[in-house]
Structures are given as C-alpha cells and as structure tokens.
Amino acid sequence: MLAEDSVLLREGLAGLLHRCGHQVVAAVGDAVALVSAVEAHTPDVIVTDVRMPPGFQDEGLHAAVRMRERTPALPVLVLSQYVQRKYASDLLDSGDGTGVGYLLKDRVGQVEDFVDALHDVADGGTVVDPEVVRQLLRRRRDPLERLTPREREVLALIAEGRSNGSIARELVVSEAAVGKHISGIFTKLDLPPADETHRRVLAVLAYLRT
C-alpha cells in the first residue's frame, strides 16, 4: 500500500513496485485515506510519506504509528524528504519494534536499495537510512555547535524578542537574509516545519539551555 501526496511520486512508486512483481492494493494521497485503506485491504507492507494532507506536517508518520499501536507487527516503511531524528525515533519505538523502516526519498532513486529495504521491512526487519544513522551518531550535547557564527547572532537576537525586521536593522542585512538564517537555525536544531512562532520558542529554549 502506498501513501504519498505527490501524484508523480505515487504513480512512479506504484509502477516501480509493479515491475518488481508486487501488487499495489491501494495508492492514496492523504493520511485519512491511508487509515481507511489499511482497514479495507490489510496490506502486507505500507510505504508512506511523513508529511501529508491535510496539515503537511507529520500526518503520515502519526497514522503509521497509530496503526502499529493497533497492529504491532504491521510492516511500515516511511519515506522522508530530510532527516528528522524525532520522526525516526517515533517510528522505531512503535509497535513491537519489528518491521519498520525510515528512508530518505533520495534513496528511492537507488532502485535496488529501495526494493531490498522494502523486502526487509515486509519480512520483519528494521531498516534505517545510512544518512539518518550518521546524523544519529553525530548527535552532540550542544545543538548550537552546528550553527554558524551569524546564525548564533540571529538566535541571540530572537531570544531578546526581536522581530525579523529588528534583527535585520541590527545586523545591517535584509529581512530575506534574516529569514534564510532562521530557516537554517530551524533545520540544524531539528525543528520540523510547523507553526513558525512555536519553532522560534523551541529555538530560544535550546539557546537558553546552553
């Protein structure tokens, strides 16, 4: 079963799996449809994106985790656009700990690796993208070590309660440049796309802890 909001990628995956001898019993575009389709078809393995409608945050992942709570051995292979340690941890901790996989979407382009990973997950194995493993191993006590000096300056000003415009005037840069730095801060602090105000608060908390 496939769950992917991008029609191109969804159809591409369906075609790829069909050529590899698999039957795609359903291909859906949102998390609600995923849950309904699983109940209707009882698939051998699920391949789902993390971010899906309606909120385009982590609906696909949450749906997978909920389904594995009900059916602990349900095999699920999650695809993600980028590395998020929390997403990987939530998935690996779900169900009975078997039959789970977390791959970056770039890995799909390496067809043999992707199909091998799918087989491993369907057989009850655990598959984690090598890049996710590298980032997990590189985890540091001080998350701010990953920030550039300029990003640290921007974060310090955010902690003072400054707006983007105020930060831009203080550093004599454009607001667009400030926005780019803030985006970099969110990425390096592993704060997934969500409500911006909420992420600013989390970033400030990380700053204050160090």
Image (cartoon, rainbow, N blue to C red):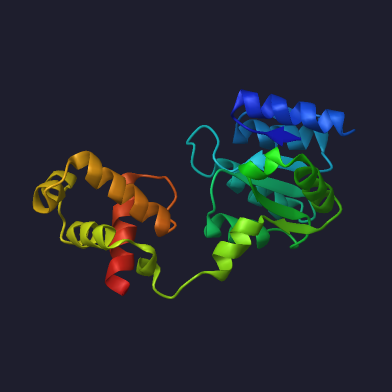
Q: Position of residue 77 (x, y in %)?
A: 71, 47
Query: Can you say whether 90 is above or below 16 in the image?
Result: below
Query: Can you say whether 8 is above or below 31 in the image?
Result: above
Q: Position of residue 9 (x, y in %)?
A: 65, 29
Query: Residue at (60%, 57%) from the top-left corner?
Result: 131
Query: Can you say whether 129 is above or below 165 in the image?
Result: below
The quadrant the N terminus occupies is top right
Give the left or right position of residue 201, taking residue 82 as reference.
left
Give the left or right position of residue 26, taking residue 6 as reference.
right
Quadrant position of residue 99: bottom right
Residue nearest the observer in this picture, 171 or 4: 171
Q: Position of residue 79 (x, y in %)?
A: 64, 44
Give the left or right position of residue 165, taking residue 190 as reference.
left
Quadrant position of residue 111: top right
Query: Residue at (53%, 69%) from the top-left corner?
Result: 138
The quadrant the C terminus occupies is bottom left
Residue nearest the observer in this picture, 128 or 100: 128
Give the tally of numbered discs: 0
Quadrant position of residue 151: bottom left
Residue 101 visible to the viewer: yes
Query: Residue at (49%, 42%) from the top-left corner?
Result: 57
Query: Residue at (83%, 49%) from the top-left corner?
Result: 122
Residue nearest the observer in this picture, 59 or 204: 204
Query: Can you say whether 65 is above or below 55 in the image?
Result: below
Q: Position of residue 74 (x, y in %)?
A: 78, 50
Residue 63 visible to the viewer: no
- Outermost residue on the right side: it is 21
